[in-house]
Image (spheres, coloured by chain):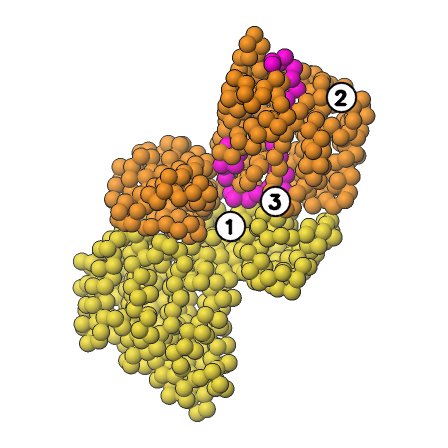
Chain colours: A orange, B yellow
Amino acid sequence: MDFPSPKGFEYSVTKAGIKYRDRYDLALIYSKKPAQIAGVFTTNQIKAAPVKLCMRRIKGGIAHAVIANSGNANACTGKKGIEDADEITYKLAERLGIKKELVFPISTGVIGMPMPMERIIPSIEDLVKDLGKAEPLQVAQAIMTTDTFPKITSKQIEAGDRVITMLGLCKGAGMISPNMATMLSVILTDARIEGQLLKDALRIAIADSFNAITVDGDMSTNDTVLLLANAEAGNPKIERKSNLWKPFRDMLHETCLELAKMIVQDGEGATKFITINVTGAKTGSDAKRIARTVANSPLVKTAFYGEDPNWGRIIAAVGYSGVPIKEEKIEIYINGICLFEKGLPTMLEESLKESLKQKEIEILIKLNLGKSQAKIFTTDLSEEYIRINSAYRT
Amino acid sequence: MDFPSPKGFEYSVTKAGIKYRDRYDLALIYSKKPAQIAGVFTTNQIKAAPVKLCMRRIKGGIAHAVIANSGNANACTGKKGIEDADEITYKLAERLGIKKELVFPISTGVIGMPMPMERIIPSIEDLVKDLGKAEPLQVAQAIMTTDTFPKITSKQIEAGDRVITMLGLCKGAGMISPNMATMLSVILTDARIEGQLLKDALRIAIADSFNAITVDGDMSTNDTVLLLANAEAGNPKIERKSNLWKPFRDMLHETCLELAKMIVQDGEGATKFITINVTGAKTGSDAKRIARTVANSPLVKTAFYGEDPNWGRIIAAVGYSGVPIKEEKIEIYINGICLFEKGLPTMLEESLKESLKQKEIEILIKLNLGKSQAKIFTTDLSEEYIRINSAYRT
């Protein structure tokens, strides 16, 4: 597959040997012209050093480059961790002839290990030397950890006689339970757009994409989404009244949603892609809380791994979510079949046997209390998740 | 092992064939004299029919009998479920010549299946006929579901020339995350005690026993603890000023703690018994919230299954618990070895290699923010948990 790159961005990757030998683990994304930048970050109070640095630098609103590494999260590494992240961006900026404040570092990997600076610093030279030689796909590959496939998508919209391109990359497979943020993701566009609109568009787009997925309920210390717009498409500037504002928002939303779904598809050990739709809630946050509680229930997840339409575990999770509900009003559907209504089981489990063998599972929970709803995407829980995570570090 | 029974209680068990043939699945506990009763129940809003019935009847404060079954939870069974539970107690009361309001039904097993009344009702005759023929251990066996061993303990204290005996039974191995309640547990004593004190003692005892354990974070619809005291020991009535008040509370607390720990030891697929101690919190509820968040993190649980001292996953869970913390003040110890302090890793993981092979793991998280603490008991998460729960129903 081909993923068109937005104009004015260049890429390079290298093998720094951060954790493993002989794999790409360090990548550079460079915008020839300074770009507008918007970002969202983990709400985990324990934030990795590069997250802290990005949060500080993003206040300036301008980015020139993103440097990304896998193999080491640079989290829980104290003052030295911040200094390391800063030095990496300083060395890179020096070689590129730009300011270090315009370089955004993102990291993923093991928590609590110092960055192997003796291997990273010399590799920066290679990144700069090879700039323009890598494809976006290779950047997506370089930031993989337990991911089994690179996550990338590309879209275009027309703007008069110009074309606006958007490229989205991300990584993530475990420790997935973003809240106002996600795993590492970089979205690049050549659109010309007002700075505040770029931020608004990102905030809207992540709400029901990156913030609507969960694999294991564990929120990372490194979650970051960066959105860069470098205006190289030459379109008339997108403002709140522009005809392009909605198509741009839609393109960004679709990009985020596709990437978020890829993360769930690649959920560690997952054999099912489960959509949980909660309707009829009094508020959107009630609906989301119930959907998340069901999505993170180990008993619900293991039931679907076993292809067992065990709605009893679903309703039990609804009941302990903390949201007030009425048992006799709840309806529970799996793949379109109603299994519980009016306080009673329908005894229709048998008719689900075949459809539970599919990879895609749809759970619909109607609360019948109000008009709000929420949708969450998640995975089942398999022995493979245990194997991956009991052996990840050692 | 021998488990002395309190005076004046009799037991019987029978094979009703509720879910499986040829195993004890229905049990009767009978107090010859009406007993004082105290109880705590699941805070899950979805409550099983027998829980609803018990909650209504316990207001009277008096119990004559407890009837317990495994194989069917009688949950999400609507009005019919309540009628079934009521009819079971009515038939039993009739045969025993007592009021049905003094019979307390407790159930455990699959959610959302009607009770097989055609098999249960005839079995009541056997229960009554065989009363006095069973030992407490057989009652504990009759309420097992995925439990691998029966959970029972017995204790005695002296009261002048009399002896007060307390017997505790419980079941539970999965869907364990009690909150103001636990899985099924019945505690019997022949103590003579004031009704209000019995309730107070139970409330105090469960706080750091049944309410301090979690296996999978899934809260059951059927959690129930019943405490019966029939005064048959002939001790002077225990009142708030009695010398016996403290020994009685201690005995009850130890009973609950032993039973709660047995549930964790028998946690589905568990290979480790993990104690999580959070100290230096601003409030007790802060400490408990952090301890529970760490205890329920699949990444923490799988790391310990893999015998990996992955404190990074512990601190990440502390960070997303929702409790305000200071990264640079946190200290994390595993089995007495400090792995993180002053914002930095100590790099002492190697020295833990041997001790992580033991079954018992001690995690100590010092927040250094205040004087409150909490302790939670939990398990690791293994492939076996997945196997048990993906195949439980089908």
Q: Are marks 3 and 2 on the same chain?
A: yes
Residue A23 horizontal side relative to residue A264, left or right: right
Q: Chain of mark 2?
A: A
Q: Amino acid at mark 3?
A: Asn
Give me the chain letter of mark 1: B
For badge 1, the amino acid type reads Leu
Mark in front: 3 vs 2: 3
- Residue at position x 26%, y 47% from top? A342
In this view, the mark in front (2 or 1):
2
Q: Quadrant of residue A26?
A: top right
How far apart in space, not on screen, are marks 2 and 1 (Cα)?
45 Å
* Alpha-carbon span between mark 3 and mark 1: 23 Å
Residue identifier under label 1: B381
Residue A334 screen position, x and y as percent: 33, 38
Percent position (x, y) of residue A248?
Answer: 54, 21
Asked if badges 3 and 1 are on one and the same chain, I answer no
| Residue range of the region highlighted in magenta in the rendering | A209-236
Residue type beneath disc 2: Val
Q: Between A158 and A95, which is closer to the camera in this rendering?
A: A158
Bin the neighbour count of mark 2 within 10 Å (Cα to Cα): few under 14, some 14-19, many 20 and up. some
